[in-house]
Amino acid sequence: MNGFVKSNSSIRKRLTIQLLCGAAILTICLVLIVRSFAQQLAEQSQDNILAASLTSILDSASIQQGEIAVDIPYSAFSMLSNLADDRVFYRIDLNDEFLTGYADLPRPNLAANSNAPVFVTGPYRGFDIRSVAATRKLALGEQPIEVRAIIAQSRNGMQETLSEISRRVILFGSGFFVLSAIIALLAAQSTVGPLTRLAASVSRRGPQDLRPVIARVPEEMAPLVQSLNQFIGRLETSLNRSEDLITEAAHRVRTPLATVRAQAEITLRRVDKDENRQSLREMIRAIDNSSRAAGQLLDHAMVTLRTDHLERHEIDLNGLVRESVARMQAVANLKDITVIFENTAPSPIQGDIILIQNAIQNLLDNAIKYSPPDSRVEVQLERKGTVVTLTFRDQGRGLPSSDAERLTQRFVRGDNVAGTVGSGLGLTIVEEVMRAHGGTLSFENNPDGVGACVSISFLLS
Amino acid sequence: MRFNIFSALLSLFSGSLAMPGYSFDIEHQQNFESRASKPEVLRILSTADIDLFTPMILSFQNQNPEVTVNYDVVSSTELMRALQDEQAPYDIAVSSAMDLQIKLANDGLALAHNSFATALLPDWGKWHDYVFAFTQEPATIVLSREAFADFGVPETRQDLISILRDHPDIFRGRVGTYDLRTSGLGYLFATQDARTSEVFWRLAEVLGNLSVELYCCSGAMIDDVSRGKIAVAYNVLGSYAMAREDAKDKILIIAPRDFTTVMMRTALIPTTSQNPKLAAKFVDHLIVSAWSAEENSGAYPFPEINRNPAASDTSLRPIQMGPGLLVYLDGLKKRRFLTEWQNAILQR
């Protein structure tokens, strides 16, 4: 049964996407954290160097011969050259009066009475600068004086270092992401693996294989497999019951009917009165009808059962037809009907031999049944490419002019069959068998207007 | 002649010149005209003598015939004034005063330049993407051969000090050095000397005792030594002295063995450049001429570059480019240094 199963996105896809999203979020977090950490570190180290430079400048301030002297040490600036493209600006004030350096360098607001250096970031001469300021108190004679130094450095170098770090972190993050993606795919694969294996092992089974699944499955799948096994069990029981029922029914119905018919025949021979003989003939006819109907019903049930889980084996269609023709020969002879079948080359097809035999039997039976006495039924087997077509032509009354399509429905018979025994299940059975085998059934009246022509086609194996 | 194609129309001016609208002093001016109908103009502001620098310009024009070069010679302090205070529109600033060049770049007055040529430079040959060295010129002691015939050649500053101390009568009034108050290069050499060794101050004192002559420039000192007017010139640009074929047998050029300060002449592209692309081309030309091994075809008028000065001669002290150079440019610091120097050298 290739039923349509409603499915939304696959577990593997969902799992993969979820894992990837997780990895992406983690990667982004990692990149951001490392970057901000690096930035902190870089800023910290720049501040440290600036502070050291500032300290060395302030330490160089002294009073010499009654005059303030600030002898900037060479190292105060050269220690700032360790970063790429960094400019140095400075300014030294004495009691709020500009003393030396860059007169337009902005002064950070120093907290009163605090010697802690103050760090400020801001623009200067079109550069983004980091500056640090601090003061030192000296005494000139009786007079306390305050030396304030500001040293600033452009942040280009730091930015460059940072962007280099960012580049590396992003590269590293991408690698990390790719790695997690691979791991995610593998994880998803291995998670879905047992499911896929279970599905494959179940669908690989033959139609008759109704053993429970015994392979080890992950804990989470155990309930599913348990349910599946229960289901299989129920199905098996139900199938067995159906088969038993059909066999039993065939036996229980056919045998008594045959007995009754035989008794009726015997009685017919013994009875002389015309009206009694007439009744008996009616009786025999009714028995025939119901026997046939019961047979067909059981056949149909059997066909339905078997087509549900079709077993395919290689069958030689040619041989099968020959057998059927031989078997029906006796019935045909009763009506002086000649069944013509020309032996052809073997035509191997894949299918259920019982079903196909049943279909051929039904078609042949129909052909003979609807043929007038002393006529011909032609059976022809034709191979064309990969298709083999079996055609039955009779010289009977043909198909009803209208509603021929309905003949394949259950219990529908042609409106021109009065007086012929039939159940209305023959073509239904044939149609179901053909559908199960992927073949086609077609019927039409013969071109010369006499009799019907019914064909079934199979794909050659 | 190769250079005929340019018919380098040389116009030479001398004396006190100035650009119209600007007040800085130009010492010399020379135009290297291109013959092209619509020449591009490259304006160079330089502290290097025209004669010394001409080969570099001609070899550039040889490769770029469509370029007219205006070459203005100024002192390093005037160069600073032109670019820092007056924003004069030059495409190239060439100077021997490395500290001033670094200051220009530090203060944001230089354009960044990055090319295949700048990649040739070692890290110590440039300051980031702004200042590019294209020479190595030692600060030497130039002696008169005649005056030192009897004393032997002093190899260190200490040797020189001894000789000068022992013979004040011979050398009085016959020693010379830069006037640090007017020469940027002299100041740079002196500050680097002072950073390196105390012997600088002793030498200054000895020179002061001998009524030292003070000079604006290396050329003048070499002239006076070769003429016999003075016998010792301290901190003379070796490259200038070596280039003086005429004075060869009159002067001795000493690279002191205790330490020899090495100045690197540098070029930068001022932000005022009207044609930064052409300027970059010229900077590349300077760098390639100086640093690329195969390019040295005689057009390079300076002593050959030593790519690894620290390893070859321990006495060589190349001046490090970096913000450290800004220290001695600080107003207070400079005033202090000059006061000390004046106390030593002028003895007043």
Image: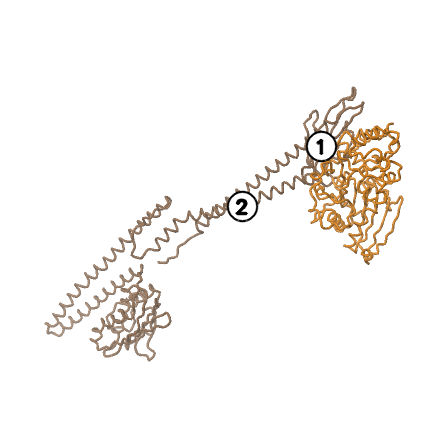
User: Which of the 4 image quarters holds residue A410?
Assistant: bottom left
Q: Colour of chain A?
A: brown
Q: Tell me the residue at 15%/73% (across/down).
A: A278
Q: Chain of mark 2?
A: A
Q: Secondary structure at mark 2?
A: helix
A264 lies above or below A147: below
What colouring method underlies this structural image? by chain
Q: Residues within 10 Å of mark 1 (few under 14, many from 20)?
A: some
Residue located beneath label 2 in the image: A175
Q: Colour of chain B?
A: orange
- Res B178 seen here: no
Work out whether residue B295 or residue B327 is closer to the camera in this orientation and state it: B295
Q: Secondary structure at mark 1?
A: helix
- Where residue A273 appears, as percent x and y from the top left, is 11, 74
Q: Is residue A431 left or right of residue B114?
A: left
Q: Amino acid at mark 1?
A: Ser
* Comes first in the chain, label 2 or label 1: 1
Give the position of the C terminus of chain A as an image quadrant: bottom left
